[in-house]
Image (cartoon, rainbow, N blue to C red):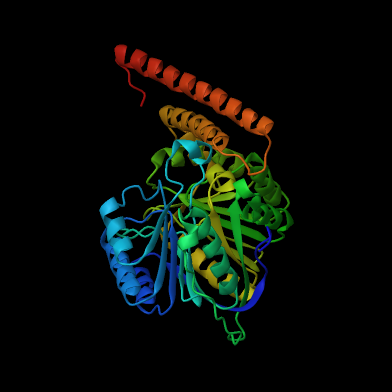
Amino acid sequence: MTREFFTTTHNNQLEFLKEGELYYSKYVELIKKAHTSIHLQTYIFLFDDFGTRVASELKKAALRGVKVYLLVDGIGSKDLSVKVEIDLVNSGVYFCRFNSFKLKWFHKLGRRLHHKVLLIDEQVAIVGGINVQTEETLPPQLDFAILIEGPLIVEMANYCKIVFKKAYTEPNLLNFVVSKHTQNFEKNGYKARILVNDWLLGRSKITQQYAQRTTTAKDQITIINPYFFPRRKFMRQLSAAALRGVRVRLILPKHSDWPTYILASEHLYNYFLKANVEIYQWTTSKLHGKLATVDNNWTTIGSFNLNYTSYQQNLEMNIDIISSEYTKIINTEIESIIKNGCKKIDQDDFNGNAPLKIKIKRFFFYLVLSFIASLSIALTYKEGHSKIFNLINVTRFILSLSILIIIISSLLIFLIYQLYNGFFIF
C-alpha cells in the first residue's frame, strides 16, 4: 500500500447515521452478526451503558471464534480500566492502547488515534465521529457516522490492519483473517473514497481536499464542525470563496464539553462575518459531528476537526462521497438542522451586545488555544526528519511553553489585582 493509500471506488452502498439509541442498537447488532473478524478503532471507549454493551458483544464474538481487534487511544480512553482490559484479553480479544504515555515516546505524545471505525467481517463498516460512549443528554448531541458496504471496504480493511499492527506491542503474534472479498458488489451505488490525515507519516489528504474543494467552489460551501479553529490559510480560502459569490455557511456549537474552545472560536467570527460568511450556532444540544458539502456534488463525513490537532497530530479518517444524488440527501439533513436547532449570528448583534468581559474572554482563550496548538505540534515530528528539524521543534516547544507561562502568570496577577480592588471581571 503506497503513501497515497486509497483509490476512488464505485458502487458503494451508504447509509447516513446520527447518534442516538437507534445508532447504538445498529452498532451492537452488527457486532452480534460478525462471523470472521471485527476491527474496532476509536478515540474514546467508555465503560458506560453503550460501552458495556459493546464490550460484552466483543467478548462473546471472540469466544465463538471471531478474530476481534480492539484499538483505543491511550489518552482518550484513559478511563477504561485495566480490569476491563484484562477481561477482554482473557476472552480472546486482541487489545491495544494507542500511544500510551511513555517517556521514550514523548516526541509522539501529541499523536492521537482520533478516527472511529467499526469493521465487520471486512464486508460492512461504520465510520464517523461517534465514540464508544453513551450520550446521555436529551436531546442527544448532534453527531454523525456513515454505514458502508462495497468495494471501499477492501482498502479500509488493509488500513485497519496496518494501524493495528504498528500499534500492537507483539505484532508477530497477530493472526489476521485472510480476506475473501467477492467482487459481486451491488450496482448503482455511490462513488466514494477513504481519506486519512496522519501528518507524522506525511499524510494530509483530508486537509488537502478541504483546501482544494474550497478554492474551486462555485455555488455553496457548508461546514459543520464542533472544534473550529482553522489555519489562517484556510480562513483566507473560505473568506475568498464568500467574496467571489459562493454561499459559505458555518454551523458551529453553542454548547460544548469544552466551553473555552467555543470562546476561542467566537473570536474568529468577525473575520468571517465581514466577508459575508453565514454563521449558525447549533443551540439544541452539544455538537460533535463533522461534515461538509460543496457545490451539491461532494460530501465528506468523518472524525476530522478543522483545528491544529486534526491537521498535524491525530490519525483521522473521513469518507469522501463524490455524488450529486447523495449530497442532496445530506443537504436535506443540513437544512433540517438549521431550521430546527440553529440560531443565525447577526454581526451587529454579535458585536454590539457582547459585554466587555466576554470579548476579553474570547481573545484570551484564542491566545491560549493558539499557544496550546503550537506546544502540541512541537511535541511531534514527521518520520525521516533530520536532527536539525527536531532541534527546531524542541526550541519551538520551549519558547511556546515560556510564552504560555507568561500569559497565565499575567492573568493570575490581573485577577488578584481585580479581587483586591473588589471587581472581578470573570
Picture quarter with the C terminus? top left
* Residue 178 versus residue 43 in the image, above or below: below
Left-right relation of 123 to 214: left
From this viewpoint, is residue 120 visible? yes
Give percent across and percent down for residue 99: 46, 47
Choose top left, top right, bottom left or bottom right for residue 182: bottom right
Left-right relation of 118 to 371: left
Number of marks in picture = 0
Picture quarter with the N terminus? bottom right
Observer-nearest of 358 and 229:
229
Choose top left, top right, bottom left or bottom right for residue 50: bottom left
Choose top left, top right, bottom left or bottom right for residue 39: bottom left
Which residue is most to the front?
172
From this viewpoint, is residue 339 visible? no
Observer-nearest of 333 and 121:
121
Residue visible at 58% across and 28% down in the picture: 394
Give percent across and percent down for residue 290: 51, 57
Give percent across and percent down for residue 257: 37, 46
Residue visible at 52% across and 30% down in the picture: 367
Observer-nearest of 368 and 125:
125
Left-right relation of 234 to 68: right
* Residue 257 versus residue 55 in the image, above or below: above
Give percent across and percent down for residue 34: 40, 77
Residue visible at 45% across and 38% down in the picture: 263
